[in-house]
Image (cartoon, helix red, strand yellow):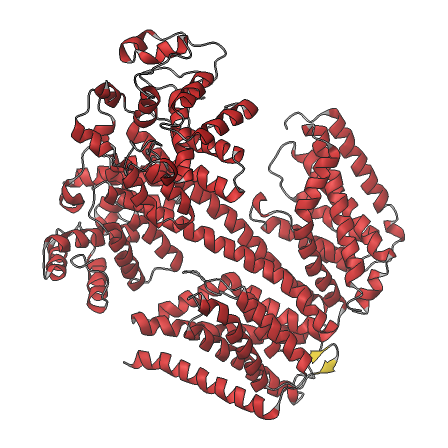
């Protein structure tokens, strides 16, 4: 269980840093209280306005940017600052804890991993910057070069943050670390640069105009946070709508309860195993959710929704009908293509369609096979004619099943 | 908008002239020209990168120019961007010219104000908080000039009051422009600081993300609406008789909700409730929905399951919350004889009562394959007759008032053909086929108020409940 030690290591390190910082700060007292207070309030506001959502990379961009800018703060309106690394961590931690109180009261607080990540990234940025700054190592970096230096430091910090973020899911799900890290890095592309840039700009602006820069810059970022939140909300709604569309076949009695959801979850896991990117996984998931939608156009239901045992022609016809519905639904052509081609012979199929086909067949067969169904179903997939199920997908499915306790069709 | 009125052309010409006058002192101006060029290129680049028209304007660069440059030089900054960016609407050249002149004028006026108030020195000396004051006034002027010019154009082309249009535009744009102004001010200050333009450009990143998120939000919302439409169209395809019915019920529900003075959010929820009220029919076998001829009691029971199916289907969509109750209960009757639960009176959720009335109204006023549409007046009279027993009188009154005020001209996006006229001035002549299909509907058209004392509201009931199932209506008779 080497992997799980990694997550424990991160938490332990964060706890150590936090305790050390709090201790040192309590012992030596706060330097430049006004500045500390201003940044503390900024982080606090950022944490208070954080949102919670399923697929949110950075829930509190304002808090993150404020914390990073405090870590990289050199001077304040021309006066050299004297705050230590430990003070930075202590102030950020205090504000973050205080800011999460209302969220915890509502029962949806930030997780421990989030806090640990925040503490460690801020510590990393501050350790990279403050000691060297204190010794005057950056005196040679004047003007624009200094700005670029800050940006470079923040990019390093963001990379470090991505490594830290990939660890908990890696430990929880035992997915390979590489793809998870790649996914985290890719996720940085959206809000990441904005957080980095704002962190750097805040540090620079405070150096030029003093603490007035904080509210002036916080407002635009608050707006960004608001737009992102609305975006996240509408994206959630959209996912729910797609799930409902997928459930239509179950309600209509065309497919057994939970089939679409199980196929979607398992397809996603198999797609991840085969190294699909996050956008590709989303397409795959939507397609898997809607793969049976064509059955709605049938005048009479297929018995138990078991399309995998129908003649190939019939399967293809239902797939085409489903593709037509999906094309109308605004979900995107990529999804429609996957739905349409799910019944084609596998050498001609795109990879997502192969996955949907194999996973769908597995779910249906495993349900029929009773106890021990999963193994029997896998065996059936392996023994099926060569053009039915792509061998690499079946093997990936077997690996996923061996590793996970995904909802099994028998119990779920 | 194809044919632009002459007055509007003259107005644009005046604006262009005024902008040129603002640019006249340019040769005599001492300005750092590379800054002008860089900012102009930045603005043009941002316009190019814009995720379509949805995202709204992007002013931080322009406002930074306002705070950095002398007025005539600042007025040059928007020109390349505005002249080169596609507007996507015709007439293309005139629109680009107008946009450039308008922005040049607004930027010039704001820069002039900023200059007069000594804002430039405050920016150079990074004299905070004083620098905020001229900046705030300049942003106000910028916003005022923009909305006044836009208001003028709208008054000339769309015949709305110039003052009202301007005021509306101003109120809407002030907050975003103010935020852009703060970013612009920070850009200007950092540009002048020892960190130089590199630091200033960093300010644009968070602004760009805001902008991007906004555009994504709109894109995703459009996709979401398309998905809802797909749900509804799936029902329409299955049912065969009810093309566009769902969307029209959504519109009628909105009419009623507005008339009752509901909050905007609730009105929106009711729109979805109306649109999705029959979504459960997806769960009813197509064979039953399309059955021609009498239904057995067993088959009727299956069809009557559709509210429960619909409720089950949309259970996972959290924003619909109240609408879910409407979907479940839109066939309940005030006297307790409806289904699925036989609720009565106040037990029926308010929104379900709204959708029930809207549903019955559209069922009566739209043409079905087995009978013709009834005039709006007759349908309203029929609803009023059944108010109390079947429908909530409050909703019926609200619908009557709303239709009186706004008329009933539903537009349906799902309709491939233009919708049949639903508001004939004279009662329609009954089509010959309708006589043997349904003897009561044409009779109603000819005699608007036939009393049916023996059966309280059988007509409206069959209209509302069986609206799309002629076979079932025949079975009841």
Residue drawn at the location 51% of the way across and 64% of the way down: A50
- Quarter of the image for the C terminus of chain A: give it: bottom left
Quarter holding residue A33 = bottom right
Compared with A281, B56 (above or below) is above
Q: Which residue is at 69% across, 45% downward?
A: B171
Residue sitting at the far right? B28
Q: Nearer the viewer, residue B279 or B35?
A: B279
Q: Is residue A53 above or below residue B235?
A: below
Give left or right: position of B195 versus A353.
Answer: right
Q: From the top left corner, tell me how far across and down residue B123 is, in percent.
A: 79, 65
The answer to whether residue B229 of the structure is visible from this angle is no
Residue A301 occupies quadrant: top left
Point out residue B328 in the picture as x, y percentages from the top left corner.
33, 40
Please state which of residues B394 and A392 is positioned toward the viewer in this rendering.
B394
Q: Quadrant for the N terminus of chain A, please.
A: bottom left
**Residue B279 in the image, given as x and y percentages of width and height:** 33, 37
Q: Is residue B225 above or below residue A36?
A: above
Question: Is A197 or B373 nearer to us in this picture?
Answer: B373
**Residue B415 shows up from this direction:** yes
Q: Give the residue at x 69% y 71%.
A: A205
Residue visible at 58% across and 53% down in the picture: B211
- Left or right of residue A403, residue A212 in this image: right
Residue A221 image offset from top left, x and y in percent: 60, 62
């Amino acid at each position: 269980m080497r992997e799980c030690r990694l997550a424990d290591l991160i938490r332990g390190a964060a706890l150590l840093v936090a305790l050390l910082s709090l201790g040192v700060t309590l012992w030596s007292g706060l330097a430049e209280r006004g500045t500390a207070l201003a940044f503390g309030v900024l982080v606090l506001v950022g944490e208070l306005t954080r949102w919670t959502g399923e697929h949110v990379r950075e829930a509190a961009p304002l808090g993150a940017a404020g914390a990073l800018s405090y870590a990289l703060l050199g001077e304040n309106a021309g006066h050299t600052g004297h705050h230590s690394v430990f003070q930075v961590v202590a102030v950020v931690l205090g504000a973050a804890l205080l800011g999460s109180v209302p969220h915890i009261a509502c029962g949806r607080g930030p997780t421990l991993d989030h806090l640990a990540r925040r503490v460690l990234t801020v510590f990393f940025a501050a350790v990279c910057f403050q000691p060297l700054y204190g010794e005057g190592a950056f005196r040679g970096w004047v003007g624009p070069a200094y700005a670029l230096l800050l940006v470079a430091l923040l990019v390093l910090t963001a990379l470090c943050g991505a490594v830290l973020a990939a660890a908990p899911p890696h430990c929880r799900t035992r997915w390979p670390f590489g793809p998870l890290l790649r996914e985290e890095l890719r996720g940085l592309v959206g809000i990441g640069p904005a957080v980095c840039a704002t962190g750097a700009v805040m540090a620079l602006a405070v150096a030029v105009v003093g603490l007035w820069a904080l509210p002036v810059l916080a407002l635009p970022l608050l707006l960004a946070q608001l737009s992102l939140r609305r975006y996240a909300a509408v994206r959630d709604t959209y996912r729910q709508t797609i799930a409902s569309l997928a459930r239509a076949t179950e309600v209509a009695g065309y497919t057994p309860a939970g089939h679409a959801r199980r196929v979607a979850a398992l397809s996603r896991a198999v797609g991840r195993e085969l190294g699909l990117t996050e956008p590709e996984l989303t397409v795959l998931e939507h397609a898997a959710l809607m793969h049976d939608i064509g059955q709605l156009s049938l005048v009479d239901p297929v018995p138990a929704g078991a399309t995998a045992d129908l003649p190939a022609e019939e399967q293809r016809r239902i797939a085409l009908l489903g593709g037509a519905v999906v094309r109308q639904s605004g979900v995107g052509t990529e999804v429609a293509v996957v739905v349409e081609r799910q019944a084609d012979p596998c050498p001609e199929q795109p990879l997502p369609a192969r996955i949907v086909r194999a996973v769908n067949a597995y779910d249906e067969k495993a349900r029929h096979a009773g106890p021990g169904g999963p193994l029997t179903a896998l065996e059936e997939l392996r023994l099926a004619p060569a053009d039915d199920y792509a061998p690499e997908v079946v093997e990936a499915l077997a690996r996923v099943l061996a590793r996970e306790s995904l909802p099994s069709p028998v119990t779920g | 908008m194809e044919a632009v009125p002459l007055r509007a052309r003259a107005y644009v010409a005046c604006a262009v002239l005024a902008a040129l006058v603002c640019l006249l002192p340019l040769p005599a101006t001492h300005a750092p020209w590379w800054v002008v060029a860089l900012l102009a290129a930045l603005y043009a680049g941002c316009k190019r990168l814009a995720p379509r028209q949805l995202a709204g304007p992007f002013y931080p660069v322009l406002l930074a120019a306002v705070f950095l440059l002398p007025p005539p030089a600042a007025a040059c900054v928007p020109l390349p961007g505005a002249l080169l960016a596609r507007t996507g609407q015709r007439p293309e050249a005139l629109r680009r010219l107008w946009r450039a002149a308008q922005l040049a004028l607004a930027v010039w006026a704001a820069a002039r104000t900023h200059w007069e108030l000594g804002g430039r020195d405050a920016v150079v000396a990074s004299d905070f908080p004083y620098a905020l004051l001229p900046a705030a006034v300049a942003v106000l002027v910028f916003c005022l000039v923009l909305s006044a010019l836009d208001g003028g154009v709208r008054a000339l082309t769309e015949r709305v009051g110039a003052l009202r249009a301007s005021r509306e535009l101003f109120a809407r744009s002030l907050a975003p422009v103010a935020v852009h102004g703060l970013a612009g001010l920070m850009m200007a200050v950092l540009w002048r600081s020892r960190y130089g333009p590199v630091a200033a450009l960093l300010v644009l990143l968070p602004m760009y993300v805001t902008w991007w998120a906004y555009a994504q939000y709109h894109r995703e919302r459009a996709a979401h609406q398309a998905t809802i439409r797909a749900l509804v169209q799936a029902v329409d395809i299955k049912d065969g008789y009810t093309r566009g019915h769902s969307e029209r019920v959504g519109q009628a529900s909105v009419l009623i909700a507005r008339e009752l003075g509901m909050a905007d959010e609730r009105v929106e929820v009711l729109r979805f409730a109306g649109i999705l009220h029959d979504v459960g029919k997806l769960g009813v076998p197509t064979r039953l929905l399309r059955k021609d001829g009498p239904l057995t009691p067993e088959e009727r029971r299956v069809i009557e399951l559709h509210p429960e199916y619909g409720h089950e289907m949309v259970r996972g969509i959290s924003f619909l919350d109240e609408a879910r109750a409407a979907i479940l209960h839109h066939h309940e009757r005030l006297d307790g004889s409806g289904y699925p639960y036989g609720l009565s009176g106040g037990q029926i959720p308010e929104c379900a009562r709204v959708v029930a009335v809207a549903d019955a109204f559209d069922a009566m006023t739209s043409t079905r394959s087995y009978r013709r549409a009834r005039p709006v007046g007759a349908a309203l009279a029929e609803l009023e007759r059944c108010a109390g027993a079947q429908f909530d009188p409050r909703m019926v009154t609200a619908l009557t008032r709303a239709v009186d005020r706004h008329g009933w001209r539903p537009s349906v996006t799902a309709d491939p053909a233009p919708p049949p006229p639903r508001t004939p001035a004279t009662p329609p002549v009954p089509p010959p086929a309708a006589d043997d299909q349904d003897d009561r509907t044409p009779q109603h058209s000819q005699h608007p108020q036939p009393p049916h004392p023996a059966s309280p509201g059988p007509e409206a009931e069959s209209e509302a409940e069986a609206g799309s199932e002629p076979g079932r209506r025949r079975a009841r008779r």
